Image: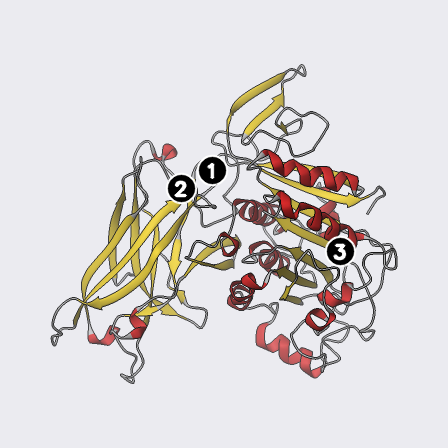
Amino acid sequence: MPQYIRFLKPPRSAAAGAETKAGKPVLVTALVTIVSDLGDTFYAHPTTLRADLRQQHGPRGASVGLGSSSLCTARIPWAGGGARTAKVEMKFLVPHTRLYDAGGKTQLKYVLEVCLETTTKKNQQQQPRMVDNLLDYQAGFGVGIVPAYSAPFGLAGGSEGFSEAFVERRFMLARDCELRIWEETGESIARHIWDGGVALTAYLAQHESSNSSSTSSSGLTSTASAPPPPLPPLSLLHKKLQQHHPYHNPLAILELGSGCGIVGIALSLILQCRPGKRNSRIVLTDLPSAEEVATRNIEANCIVRGGGERQQQQQEEGELEGQEEGKAETVFRVYDWDDPLPPQNVFDQDINGGENENPHHMHKNNNSIRKPDIILVADCTYNPDSAAALVKTLRRCCLPTGAGGNTHSRDFGLSGDTDTNTETVVVLAHKKRHESETLFFELMAQAGFVVVDQYGFSTKAKSGSLAQPGVRVGGTAGTRSGVARRGRVVQEDSVGEEVEEEEVEVVDLYTFRLGGGDV
């Protein structure tokens, strides 16, 4: 799984000399590291980073792409071994026209991008690769490093010369579909992205953005009558994603322990970017400490999507009554798994954040109760102390209405047509970090949950495919209990004998259902 470039000290600018007619000498500094998702290990091999200072464009704080001109470029050596930090220093002359806008009063803002320096060496396959396109992040990718993009800051001095304590991640999910996720630069791992979320997001991008029975591999509508392609490995999830959902009864997706919101937001974008758009309503939930960064990410990805301002105007004017596709809504709600039920005053409101003033935003039966169609859980099993509360919450959300559980699902903002026969699919991304995590799987079994699919996500070099028939993790044949040795892949050869391969890092992706039956 990847390593992450992080800002230990966010960028700041300062005067580096007396201003002249030619411009202003400026010094930009930052302190970075290359570290694992939890910050417990550092990248051990020497490499070179590249820092580019580019002007911000657009309301989302976007800078121009890596191929465009940079105001200043620096190459930063990473020593490897016991290295824990690398210092960025960029001293250069800024023309006056690059300090302020045309009016001369507002500072122009810049973004510091830190990524891997590209290499043309013969041993390039042994070098780490930049993780910025999740369509490529699969078996054979090898070691990946995620670039970092700072929050915008100015170069003319004053308080605007300090970047906020946030770092942005940018991932391509499909052609013309980019995911932008902000993290905090501090040490709170709850407000960082983790490997399980990245793995599940990459899986969805690779399998769902192009998975449509009505489209060809080129993304164009196919006129030929051909059988639908086989379902990807997590078949139960994809069956659910392919179901038809009309405009006023969208696919209802709940994410528990969403953190920054990478999985839920990515899925919302994918459902809009893929051929054959799906109406979806996604509710991210976590503790209050995650609300600021999750809300920032929802806004950064322009959700509501599928038409932008024009679609919002059409919704307000009632023009989309009966529309079949194109609506995606995503919100954040505070929810603690130890709460007996979501408090109604927190969740009982329109998905768009209002008081349900617009009748076209919700189904006409606003008091209807529905279960989530899909529950997303990524990187939430590391703490055994919270396992019981998480399993109890999952069971409560999956039980039929009136069966002692899901009596307040509408409080998550998932109102819609009531369908007590709809089965909820639980999707779990799990990277095993210690033995105590097996408690979660034991409690899931006791609660009546059954594993339907399991998929080992790895970027091991020279792998033939992301998941192979017969591959299981940890040599626990038939148990699917999540008790894998971390990163140890065991598979059967042609005669059924176990062949143990090299150690790799694996994220296990699961689908669960409560009890038996078909979707």
The type of residue carrying mark 1 is: Phe
| Residue 158: percent from left, percent from top | 27, 75
- In the rendered view, would you say 134 is above or below 497? below
The location of residue 182, given as percent across then percent down, is 47, 60
Q: Secondary structure at mark 2?
A: strand
Q: Is disc 3 surrounded by few (<14), some (14 to 19) or many (20+) residues within 10 Å?
A: many
- As measured in the structure, the alpha-carbon distance from the residue carrying label 1 to the one carrying label 3 is 33 Å
Q: Which label sits on residue 373?
A: 3
- Circle 3 SS class: loop
**Is mark 2 in CB contact (under 8 Å) with mark 1?**
yes
Looking at the picture, which amino acid does disc 2 mark? Arg
* Secondary structure of residue under mark 1: loop
Q: Is disc 1 surrounded by few (<14), some (14 to 19) or many (20+) residues within 10 Å? A: many
Mark before the other along the chain sequence, 2 or 1: 2
Q: Within 10 Å of the Cα at label 2, are there few (<14), some (14-19), or many (20+) other Cα atoms?
A: many
Whether 267 is drawn above or below 61: the answer is above
Residue shown at 41% from the left, 57% from the top: 185
Sequence-first disc among 2 and 3: 2
Residue 289: which quarter of the image?
Answer: bottom right
Please tell me whether mark 2 or mark 3 is closer to you in this view.
Answer: 3
What residue does disc 2 label?
129
Q: Residue at x 65, y 67 (%)?
A: 329
Note whether 445 is above or below 484 in the view shown.
below
- Distance CA(mark 2)–CA(mark 1): 8 Å
Of the two numbered discs 1 and 3 on the same chain, state the one appearing first in sequence.
Answer: 1
Q: Residue at x 32, y 43 (%)?
A: 84
Specify how the rendered protein is coloured. secondary structure
* Residue bearing the label numbered 1: 141
In the displayed structure image, the side of residue 222 where residue 292 appears, left or right = left
| Position of residue 437 measured from the top left corner of the image (x, y, whole percent) | 62, 38
Looking at numbered disc 3 in the image, what kind of residue is underneath it? Asp
Where in the figure is residue 172, as x and y percent of width and height? 50, 53
